[in-house]
Image (spheres, rainbow, N blue to C red):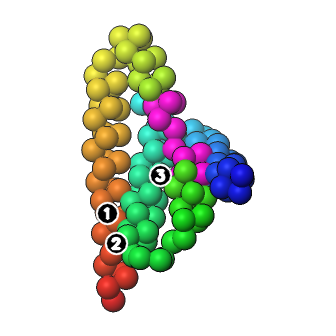
Amino acid sequence: MYQVMLVALGGAIGSAARFTLSGLVLRYSLDWRFPLPTFTVNIIGCLVIGMLAGLASKEGFISPDMRVLLFTGLVGGFTTFSAFGLETLVLLREGLVGIAAAYIVSSIVVGLVLMWLGFELVKMTMQA
């Protein structure tokens, strides 16, 4: 039950952060069809989870309870794969195949690059 509470706490924080960041990006982004708020949240989530994975790779650096709070709760509540799927479907149904393809490819490529970068940044700073 304790870990469920940790997931709920992390999820609440992550969801609130996602809502806030998405709103800011939407407010200050250009009026275009690319779903920039979800893209921004997801790539930042990839960077954060990469950094957390780098920290977690050090034995005993992140406790099992903290992993549940941060990975499943916080980052799980922050990132938005279901929104990514829905926005892609909407783009495809509107006939915006090129934008949908760019969204899919850029989300995956940029997400993986930032995840790797986050992991490597933590690894480099922990070696110093």
Alpha-carbon span between mark 1 and mark 2: 6 Å
Which residue is the site of mark 3? 45
Q: Residues within 10 Å of mark 3 (few under 14, many from 20)?
A: many
Q: Identify residue for label 1.
A: 117
Q: Looking at numbered disc 1 in the image, what kind of residue is underneath it?
A: Leu
Residue 28: image quadrant is top right
Above or below: residue 66 compared with residue 74:
below
Q: CA distance from mark 3 to mark 2?
A: 15 Å
Tell me the quarter of the image containing the C terminus.
bottom left
Magenta residue span? 73-84
Q: Secondary structure at mark 1?
A: helix
From the top left corner, tell me how far across and down residue 77 is, in percent.
59, 45
Residue 108, image x, y percentages? 31, 41
| Residue that carries the numbered disc 2 in the rendered image | 121
Give me the C-alpha separation between circle 1 and circle 3: 12 Å
Q: Does label 3 or label 2 sit earlier along the sequence? A: 3
Asked if marks 1 and 3 touch (Cβ < 8 Å), the reply is: no
Q: Is residue 28 visible?
A: no
Mark 2: few, some, or many residues within 10 Å (few <14, many ≥20)? Answer: some
Residue in view at x 28 percent, y 22 percent: 98
Rendered image quadrant of residue 126:
bottom left
Residue 94 falls inside the magenta stretch: no
Which residue appears farthest toward the front when viewing the image? Answer: 1
Residue 110: image location, x then y, percent: 31, 47
Q: What amino acid is found at the position of numbered circle 3 in the picture?
A: Gly
Are the two marked residues, 3 and 2, in contact with CB atoms closer than 8 angstroms?
no
* 1 and 71: which is toward the camera: 1
Is 63 displayed left or right of 91 in the figure?
right
Label 3 element class: helix
Q: Is residue 104 above or below residue 118?
A: above
